[in-house]
């Protein structure tokens, strides 16, 4: 399947969030939809540790704790610890909300390559 965002073979086809009928990953679609909404009040972005920043980048790609742990050579429980810290620092309700907040505050970028 070809991803509608970057026109490449989609790495999320095996993902439970993959929508066969519409041929897109609902995780990315949800992030783009939320980013379309206006931000209420800009604030100073919170300071994250390097490790939290690395994990946040991988969360934005939809990686699981196990995948992040393997990539960073840490235990999945350690990833969970860092994700919990991210949620607290960003005042986020969940992982997707954390990515949206981070993009809005300029901590990470999340660009669509679709034209």
Image: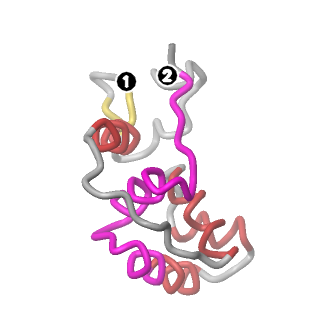
Q: Give me the residue at 39% from left, 81% from top.
A: 88
* Mark 2 lies on residue: 1
* Of the pair 77 and 61, the residue shown nearer to us: 61
Q: Residue 66, percent across and down? A: 56, 70
Q: Quadrant of residue 113?
A: top right
In the orientation shown, which residue stands out farthest toward the right? 73
Residue 97 as seen in the image, left or right of residue 67: left
Q: Give me the residue at 51% from left, 53% from top.
A: 60
In the orientation shown, which residue stands out farthest toward the top? 115
User: Quick one: label 2, few (<14), some, or many (20+) residues within 10 Å?
Assistant: few
Image height of 47 relative to 54, above or below:
below
Residue 21 colored magenta?
A: no
Q: Give me the residue at 49% from left, 67% from top.
A: 45
Residue 2 as seen in the image, left or right of residue 72: left
Q: Residue 94, percent across and down? A: 32, 67
* Of the pair 105 and 14, the residue shown nearer to us: 105
Q: Who comes first in sequence, dot 2 or dot 1?
A: 2
Q: Quadrant of residue 101?
A: bottom left
* Mark 1 lies on residue: 23
Q: Quadrant of residue 111?
A: top right
Look at the numbered discs 2 and 1 and tell me whether their residues touch, using CB distance below 8 Å. yes
Q: Which mark is residue 39?
A: none
Residue 97 colored magenta?
A: yes
Q: Give me the residue at 50% from left, 86% from top.
A: 81
Mark pair 2, 1: CA separation: 7 Å
Which element type, helix, strand or loop, lies under badge 1? loop
For the record, the magenta segment spans 84-113
């Amino acid at each position: 399947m070809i991803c509608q965002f970057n026109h490449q073979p989609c790495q999320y086809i095996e993902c439970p969030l993959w929508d066969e009928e519409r041929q897109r990953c609902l995780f990315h679609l949800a992030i783009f939809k939320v980013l379309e909404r206006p931000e209420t009040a800009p604030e100073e972005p919170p300071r994250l540790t390097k490790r939290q920043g690395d994990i946040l980048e991988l969360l934005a790609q939809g990686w699981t704790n196990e995948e992040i742990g393997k990539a960073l050579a840490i235990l999945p429980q350690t990833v969970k610890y860092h994700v919990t810290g991210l949620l607290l620092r960003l005042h986020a309700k969940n992982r997707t909300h954390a990515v949206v907040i981070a993009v809005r505050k300029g901590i990470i970028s999340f660009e669509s390559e679709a034209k």
